[in-house]
Amino acid sequence: MIRGLYTAAKSMSTEVRRVDVLANNIANVDTNGFKKDYVITGPFKEVLISRLNDSSLTDRYQTFGGVSAESTGKGLKVETSGAYLVIDTPRGKGYHTRAEIEVNPEGYLITATGNYIMGLQGRIRVDSPGTMSIDDTGTVFSGGRPVDRLRLFTGPNVIGTMNAGARTDDIVTSFMQGSIKVTSNTTDLAIRGEGFFTVSVDGEERYTRDGSFGIDAEGFLVTKDGYRVMGEEGQVWIDEGSMDVMSNGEIYVDGEYVDTLKLVKAENPEALVKIGDNLYKAREEARLNYVPEGEVLQGFIEASNVSSVKEMVGMLTAFRSYEANQRIVTAYDSILEKAVNEIGRA
């Protein structure tokens, strides 16, 4: 009973986090170059449950009925009878009676969510993913030869598995291109395609898709928050001349070449971290590439990629889910109150 109370409460906490992210997206629907965030949720790991203090089932093990494997095109759909697959997850071991198994780039067997399938020798690795098969005993074959055997678990009085409900796995950013708006302002720039502008913040490089630039009192090209835009030769100085920007990022002032915008592309954009002011900080695993690929458009601005209608629908769904879990918590509270005040008194 108490586990169900905590499960519902955790789901409420997850929906609150989702609402926070959706509200932030809606608040930035008119922010140039803003990229919306998603909340990725998933279940807690599966744990085994068993009967306690049941003399009729003491030390009784389930009868192992074998393993069945069916091809899914990308891998195998595996089901067990009378035993549980052991899954290695970031939060410890999990147990399942079925899983869709694939092979990751390193050759290891994983579930559709990226967790490792465990064998008797540890994580299972195959040499020829295309020829992988699993027989009814759980033996894994690759290229016609056995490489390991699935680690299968069964215990006394085990009656199934359960988890503690939903949790927030991660918050990820969608870098989908926003619509391009015409402004006819010569200091407004947009990137069509992949890439980011580089700006200097306290002597360090930061990155943005917001090209609503201006010129400060010293003649430097700056963001709306006053951060200076970087070129390949340093901070871009325009002064009072007429600025023209080519599609490859080359900047000309009164017809004379000044610099080329320092455009970067992140090979792994998931490693870019939002730091405020519509800027990103790159972790090492972002693998920045300083060879420009996007096309620079002068007199244009990239709009936010947020759809206010979709975000509002998502928020209504989150509210309904929160309210459903709230009713469950209220029901558990009523049951516990009766258990303490009525049954306990008797």
Image (cartoon, grey):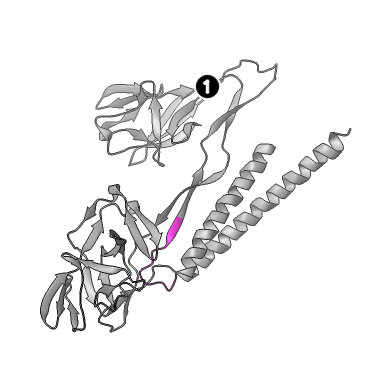
Q: Which residue is mark 1?
A: 154
Q: Position of residue 163 (x, y in %)?
A: 56, 37
Residue type for callout 1: Thr
Instruction: Say which quadrant the C terminus sits in.
Output: top right
Q: Nearer the viewer, residue 301 or 282?
A: 282
Q: Is residue 114 above or below residue 50?
A: below
User: Image point 58% across, 50% down: which residue?
Assistant: 13
Q: Nearer the viewer, residue 319 or 228?
A: 228
Is 245 covered by the magenta stretch?
no
Q: Is residue 308 above or below residue 81?
A: below
Q: Position of residue 120 (x, y in %)?
A: 39, 20
Instruction: Say which quadrant the N terminus sits in.
Output: top right
Q: Is residue 280 above or below residue 75?
A: below
User: Image point 28% across, 65% down: which residue?
Assistant: 199
Q: Position of residue 75 (x, y in %)?
A: 34, 38
Is 36 covered by the magenta stretch?
yes
Q: Count the numbered circles shown.
A: 1
Secondary structure under badge 1?
loop
Is 92 situated left or right of 221 in this image? Answer: right
For residue 150, what is the image quadrant? Answer: top left
Is 95 situated left or right of 320 in this image? Answer: left
Q: Residue furthest left?
A: 256
What's the magenta region?
29-38
Q: Residue furthest right?
A: 346
Q: Position of residue 117 (x, y in %)?
A: 39, 31
Give neighbour class at mark 1: few <14, some 14-19, many 20+ (Cα, 10 Å).
some
For residue 189, what is the image quadrant? Answer: bottom left
Is 26 situated left or right of 288 in this image? Answer: right
User: Image point 61% across, 51% down: which residue?
Assistant: 12
